[in-house]
Amino acid sequence: MKFRRGLLPIAVLFLAGCAANPVTGKKELHMVSETQEIQIGQQQYAPGRQSQGGDYMTDAAPTQYVQQVGARLAAVADRPLPYEFVVLNNGELNAWALPGGKIAINRGLLMELNNEAELAAVLSHEIVHAAARHGAQQLEQGQLMQIGAAVATVAAGAYGGSDVGQMVGQGAMLGAQLLQAKYGRDDELEADTYGMQYMKRAGYDLQAAVSLQELFLRKFETGKGEDRGSSLFASHPPSAQRVAANKSTMMNLGGPGGDLGSDRYASAMAGLKKSAPAYAKADEALELARKKDFSAARSRVDEAIRLLPREARFHGLRGEIAMATKDPKAALGDFDKAQQLDPGYFKPIVQAGMAQYELGNKAAAEPLLTRSMQLLPTAPAAYYLGRLHEERNDTGEAVKLYKLAAGSQSQYGAEALSRLTRLDLPQNPQAYLAVQPQIDNQGRVWLTVGNRTTVPVTQVNIVVGVVDASGRMAYGPERVGTGRDVIPPQKAVNLQTSLGPFQSTEVLRFVKWQVEHAQVQ
């Protein structure tokens, strides 16, 4: 099974050329072509939406409306791109853009806006981030190219399950970094300024761009710690300077006046805003669940379901509460209902797979876990699929899956790492042991052998010798080992060799070793 999403070869990104920025007209060094920008956006748009709560499916009106407003603005943008707009089922105040024009806005932000012109201010700002190559520039500057890391963690969106939100795989990692990109001051001011130009061309009242920044600044200044640390404020920090800059831009472009679209906005968002009490109940349920008050949490989520029975996330949250109280059978019914209401969202699918596994229905669990990995690779799905492959003695596939999960900072990551070590250490002992040569006071070589794993290791055998300048063996080789002695997890032991005595520590550069054997106790 292969779950990694396609990732453009990094070497291909660096075919540099000098060109004018399509928005500002400034000369720039372009190392990511437009074709590559579009490909990156297309590759990362679906997993990015999954990781941020999934598409908002409860009411089609907000998405259709956002797409109409987005198309109106895209038509007057400086750069033609295959722009797409989607509403995400996430209560946080946020919006983001990927390279190539893939744009998302959260339902939480839509609930705070007052009119269509404020929505236009949000969308035009994000359009500029894509059109002016701000994400591509961060790729070019190496700010997002930490491809060597094993795992990226992205919030799973509304209603919990941080473990389920642990993303794995480098293909998912690039998208995670793009979504978490923090734009610099110049990029933010540029997106404000040119976004207001797009608003003007489309006929919107520029006062809305001012009131939008005032809203963000007010939310930031009066918000609690969690609110102040929201994704919007991290990636698009509000400031009095931005409010003043927008006022100045408005006057330079002819002052206030134009289309506010208050009635249109109220009509399109009526259903969404009417649902606010239901989401408030679900938020209360989540907070109670985090405090382990599962009875009260279930009561609150039941209230949310009575208010808005077609919201899949509420049923998913109810299932999570049942899983937390060790009732996978009841949870499975809730996860099935969530899938019926929103069949394209990864979270209830992986959770249903986990519930089926815990119930012993492993044949039913596997296709669910596999499907969830295709939507968004996660540590829980990789871990449980690894268990299934291990149980059928498919060790090679189990090792691959455990490696995917092992980097996650979650219970699944820890358990996957333990199982991975037990399966893989006998075949690849060198990968799990840290060996460092030392010289004692008599000039003899010792080896400090560290156990990097979370399990005890024993019967370690190491071949060691000293080579000359040409690389030929000059002393040794010989074998040293622990015998039946145990190296505890995250601990080290010293093994004495007969190599030496040597007059200088310079010889340490020429000590070579190979871990021949080790096994888990």
Image (cartoon, rainbow, N blue to C red):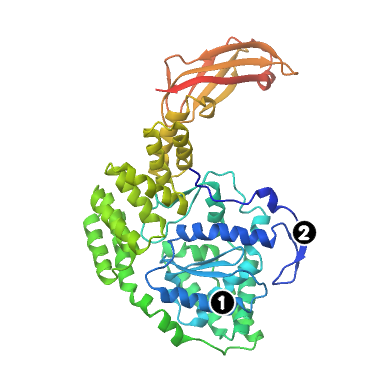
Residue 360 percent across, percent down from the top left: 28, 41
Residue type beneath disc 2: Gly
Horizontal placement of 442 versus 308: left or right? right
Q: Quadrant of the C terminus?
A: top left
Q: Nearer the viewer, residue 519 or 60?
A: 60
Position of residue 454 relative to residue 327, above or below, is: above
The residue at which mark 1 appears reads as: 71
Crowding at dot 1, Cα within 10 Å, few <14 / some 14-19 / many 20+, comes out as some
Position of residue 395 relative to residue 443, above or below, is: below
Q: Are marks 2 and 1 in contact (CB under 8 Å)?
A: no
Residue 30 percent across, percent down from the top left: 73, 60
Residue found at the far bottom of this picture: 257
* Secondary structure of residue under mark 1: helix
Visible residue check, residue 59: yes
Position of residue 2 relative to residue 91, above or below, is: above
Which comes before the other along the chain, label 2 or label 1? 2
Q: Which mark is residue 263?
A: none
Residue type beneath disc 1: Ala
Residue 285 percent across, percent down from the top left: 29, 61
Q: Nearer the viewer, residue 171 or 333?
A: 333
The residue at which mark 2 appears reads as: 17
Which quadrant holds residue 417? top left
Mark 2–mark 1 Cα distance, whole angstroms, equals 30 Å
Residue under the image location 47 percent in, 78 percent down: 65
Crowding at dot 2, Cα within 10 Å, few <14 / some 14-19 / many 20+, comes out as few
Position of residue 32 relative to residue 377, above or below, is: below
